[in-house]
Image: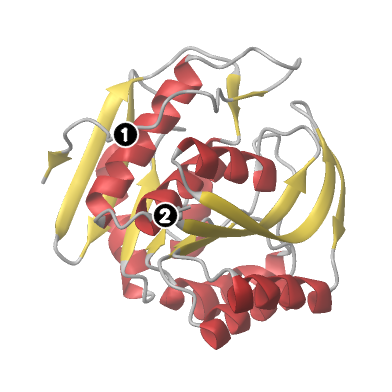
Amino acid sequence: MDNPPPIALTIAGSDSGGGAGIQADLKTFHAFGVFGCSALTAVTAQNTIEVAAIYPLPEEIVREQIRAVAADIPPDAVKTGMLVSEALVKCVAHAIEEHGLPNYVLDPVMISTSGHRLLDKEAEDTIRRKLVPLATVVTPNLDEARILTGLPIEAPGDLAEAARAILDLGAQATLVKGGHFTGDEAVDLLLTEEGEHVWSRPRLNTSAGHGTGCTLSAALAAGLAAGRPLVDAAAAAVDFVARALASAPGLGAGRGPLNHFVKAHPGPPDDSG
């Protein structure tokens, strides 16, 4: 190709149901015209109803996957998802630093939608200390933001305080996802040292939603890999997830996957504060 595509690397677990994890990330990269590479951290047996089993991969093979990609197909952006254990968190943090991986999007995957713990409790503080300071942007949902900050976060008005607390841990920016609040509006808030950006949209009445966090962070990484400014990349990511959720294919008997076939394009104007 005369103009090779941007490259993004996802470091995450495999979802046998195809709606989240590595599978969702690679589908999202493709939708944004970004070439996707992967480093697998765990194999899971899961579907829209449950996470039946998790098999973490050895640190050595995770380390070697990242090294192999960085040495030959250096990514323009990287995202992490499910890291399972404290040992793997440390392994990945070291690899990001060792290889100088740019535009790091940290999705601090901790608990699944079905309530299954996806990260050892001992690893939570390690994420705060080792990964958050490396992050270009952290993308927690409400539960993850509560764990990272210790704040209750009970209403949309609490999002900015939580985002600021994560910036204080060393991140360059934070996109806190407020989709799990009750009410008629779904609100997401991006905070950087330059300002605050808020996206609000009517809440969808849907049983879908499996993989929303993976898809959002992958879309954000894809935008950064393509050279978009952070705010533009975040707007496009929020818009992509909203439309993918609105047109979900209705697969499975539980929390269904998104429609990763929707066309990616720049998001709507943000409501900046």
Is 35 located above or below residue 241 in the figure? below
9 sits left or right of 181 in the view: right
Secondary structure state at the residue bearing disc 1: strand
Name of the residue lying farthest toward the left: 273
Secondary structure state at the residue bearing disc 2: loop
Which x, y percent locates residue 92?
A: 64, 75
Q: Residue at x 67, y 48 (%)?
A: 22
Which x, y percent locates residue 154?
A: 38, 41
Tell me which numbered mark, 2 or 1, is placed earlier along the sequence.
2
Q: Nearer the viewer, mark 2 or mark 1?
A: 2
Task: State the separation of the CA atoms marked 2 and 1.
Answer: 41 Å
Q: Residue at x 43, y 50 (%)?
A: 222
50 sits left or right of 55 in the view: left
Residue type, mark 2 in image:
Asp
Residue type, mark 1 in image:
Val
Location of mark 2 (residue): 2
Residue 153 in view of the camera: no
Name of the residue lying farthest toward the front: 2
Which x, y percent locates residue 3?
A: 40, 54
Residue 99 in view of the camera: yes
Which x, y percent locates residue 175?
A: 35, 51
Q: In which image quadrant can residue 45 be found?
A: top right
Q: Local crowd at mark 1 within 10 Å, few (<14), some, or many (≥20)?
A: many
Q: Which mark is residue 187?
A: 1
Q: Nearer the viewer, residue 29 or 133?
A: 29
Q: Residue at x 62, y 79 (%)?
A: 71
Is 116 located above or below residue 229 in the figure? above
Q: Which mark is residue 106?
A: none
Q: In which image quadrant can residue 178 be found?
A: top left
